[in-house]
Image (cartoon, grey):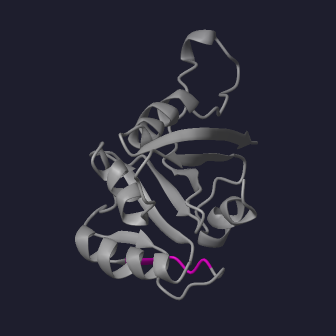
Amino acid sequence: MHKEASNILRLRGVTNLSVSANLDVYLSRRAGFVFSAEKIIRCMLDRGWTIVHREMIFFLPVGDVDEYDWQEEKISENDFLIEIVKKKEIAKEIIGVDLYWKDTDVGVSMLMFPSYELSFSVSINRSTMDLSDLCLKEKIDITDVSWYLNTILPCFETSELTVSKYVFSQTC
């Protein structure tokens, strides 16, 4: 995991200090496909994720080089992909955007590095395992890893892309 990904929530001030969960995804391209940040993000948008939440998009702006000065702006999805993502990709900047699952408040903060490696900080209303059947004395805060794997990884299994490796980590 990139140190940038592990520090992202602390810098934004929204972290649950007791739990940090991340999913790093490494992509491989199939014959004839040219990596594109816009295409990679569209793979997620086409499969149930959205970047617009309460009419706003939370993202790293153009020119943000290792500062992680996240901004929230009322901008359309297409304008974001054309005006922000393409410019950041050309400048070889880290692309950052929050994504939300369908009509829920469950989300992730995604960083896309110039190498097209993806790091998802599982931070926004993190989906946790329901362990109520286990008669536990204390609540155990365990990320529902299968939920994230089942909603993120299939986005990148296309005729153009495949997941070559992924690493999920949780630190308490």
Which secondary structure is most common in the magenta stretch?
A: loop
User: Is residue 118 in view?
Assistant: yes
User: Is residue 76 in view?
Assistant: no
Q: Between residue 73 and residue 112, name the one nearer to us.
A: 112
Q: Is residue 48 above or below residue 96?
A: above
**Could you say which quadrant of the image residue 143 lies in?**
top right
Left or right? Give the position of 76 relative to 95. left
Residue at horizontal 69 percent and vertical 46 percent from the top = 19
Residue at horizontal 29 percent and vertical 43 percent from the top = 48
Total residue callouts: 0
Q: Is residue 64 above or below residue 152?
A: below
Q: Is residue 165 above or below residue 116?
A: above
Left or right? Give the position of 84 relative to 88. left
User: What percent of the width, then of the height, locates residue 104?
Assistant: 33, 45
User: What percent of the width, then of the height, locates residue 97?
Assistant: 45, 65
User: What percent of the width, then of the height, locates residue 21?
Assistant: 65, 45
Examine the structure image and report whether residue 82 is included in the region drawn in magenta: no
Q: Between residue 66 and residue 38, name the one nearer to us.
A: 38
Residue at horizontal 70 percent and vertical 25 percent from the top = 138
- In this view, the residue farthest toward the bottom is 63
**Could you say which quadrant of the image residue 144 lies in?**
top right
User: What percent of the width, then of the height, locates residue 58?
Assistant: 42, 70
Residues shaded magenta:
68-72
Residue at horizontal 63 percent and vertical 39 percent from the top = 165
